[in-house]
Amino acid sequence: MKELLKNVVYAGIGAAFLTRDKIEEIRGELVTRGKMSTDEGREFVDDLIKKSESAKDQLELWLNRQVEDRVKQLNLATADDIADLQRKIAELQVALNTKAGE
């Protein structure tokens, strides 16, 4: 019963977006209704929080990869590209100033 309930909560709410407050609220309702004991409720909360944090981390990694892929497809300059160009411009300015001073 407990596993079935967890699966329903994961599917129905989406573990990636559960906050600790919302998880505690769900736990409280389940304990109040007698669907689980207080100890099971604590375990339930800990498990959901771990899964929620893991899902958030995975979502963040996926989003970062998607953004990087789109930037590459668009052939946009990155911050590193711009910094490299600024460094090269500074080097050219130094070289021009040195040559003009001769």
Image: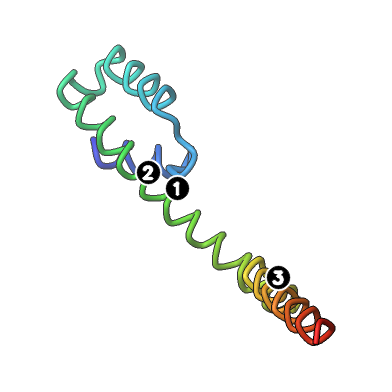
Q: Amino acid at mark 3?
A: Ile
Q: Secondary structure at mark 2?
A: helix
Is 78 positioned to the left or the right of 27 in the image?
right
State the separation of the CA atoms marked 1 and 3: 31 Å
Image quarter in which the C terminus is found: bottom right
Label 1: which residue? 56
Quadrant of res 48:
top left
- Residue 16 vs 76, above or below: the answer is above
Label 2: which residue? 53
Label 3: which residue? 82
Quadrant of res 79:
bottom right
Q: Position of residue 58 (x, y in %)?
A: 43, 56
> Residue at horizontal 60%, vertical 67%?
66
Identify the residue at the far top of this view.
32
Mark 1 vs 3, N-terminal side: 1
- Residue 9 vs 27, above or below: the answer is below
